Image (cartoon, rainbow, N blue to C red):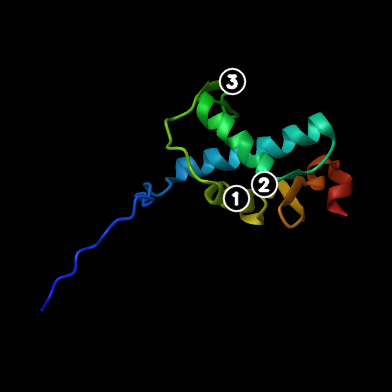
Amino acid sequence: MSLTQTVKLPTWKPQLIPLSEEEREWMRGVVTRAVFSVWNRYGRPTDLAEIYQYYLKQASEGWHFDQERNYFRLQPSFPQRGKRTVDRRVNEAASKQFGAKVVAVTSGIYQPSPRLFLNEEKAEK
């Protein structure tokens, strides 16, 4: 019985630690703020590439807004994640399970949910 040895290519990278629930929640908040910031600044939906650039900036700066305490605080140190991981958090932010604060306009294009801008009477209809 011969044993074969695994050869790692120079491009091989070890997998990162799986995301904790705290990191998932933080990332959903970052992508939601990215969508809202583009909408508020430019009045248009945003694509996944812009959301990822916003995430990279937030992850490198280390500050984020704590809604419960209503102030900016230093984020926990999370490893920088890849674009696909951020794309998954965008999909989670757009799902009903997490409140659907953003919605997909088309494939890869997101905007704030119009339901958030309706008053109580119109939302019930």
Q: How far apart are marks 1 and 2 (CA)?
A: 7 Å
The residue at 57%/53% (across/down) is 88
- How many discs appear? 3
- The reply to whether discs 3 and 2 touch (Cβ–Cβ < 8 Å) is no
Amino acid type of the residue tagged 3 in the rendering:
Tyr
Mark closest to the chain's N terminus, 1 or 2: 2
Q: How far apart are marks 3 and 2 (CA)?
A: 27 Å
Amino acid type of the residue tagged 1 in the rendering:
Asp
Within 10 Å of disc 1 (Cα), the crowding (few <14, some 14-19, many 20+) is: some
Question: Secondary structure under badge 3?
Answer: strand
**Residue 108, position as x, y percentages in the image:** 71, 53
The residue at 52%/21% (across/down) is 73
Q: Which residue is at the front of the view, 66 or 6? A: 6
- The reply to whether discs 1 and 2 touch (Cβ–Cβ < 8 Å) is yes
Within 10 Å of disc 3 (Cα), the crowding (few <14, some 14-19, many 20+) is: few
The residue at 42%/45% (across/down) is 20
Q: Is 28 displayed left or right of 124 in the figure?
A: left
Vertical arrangement, residue 71 with respect to residue 39, above or below: above
Question: Secondary structure under badge 2?
Answer: helix
- The residue to which callout 1 is attached is 87
Q: Which residue is at the front of the view, 24 or 58? A: 58
Mark closest to the chain's N terminus, 3 or 1: 3
Q: Which of marks 3 and 2 is in front?
A: 2
**Residue 7, position as x, y percentages in the image:** 26, 59
Amino acid type of the residue tagged 2 in the rendering:
Leu
Q: How far apart are marks 3 and 1 (CA)?
A: 26 Å
Return the residue found at the far left.
1
- The disc at residue 67 is none
- The residue to which callout 2 is attached is 48
Q: Tell me the quarter of the picture where residue 46 sits.
A: top right
The residue at 59%/20% (across/down) is 71
- The residue to which callout 3 is attached is 71
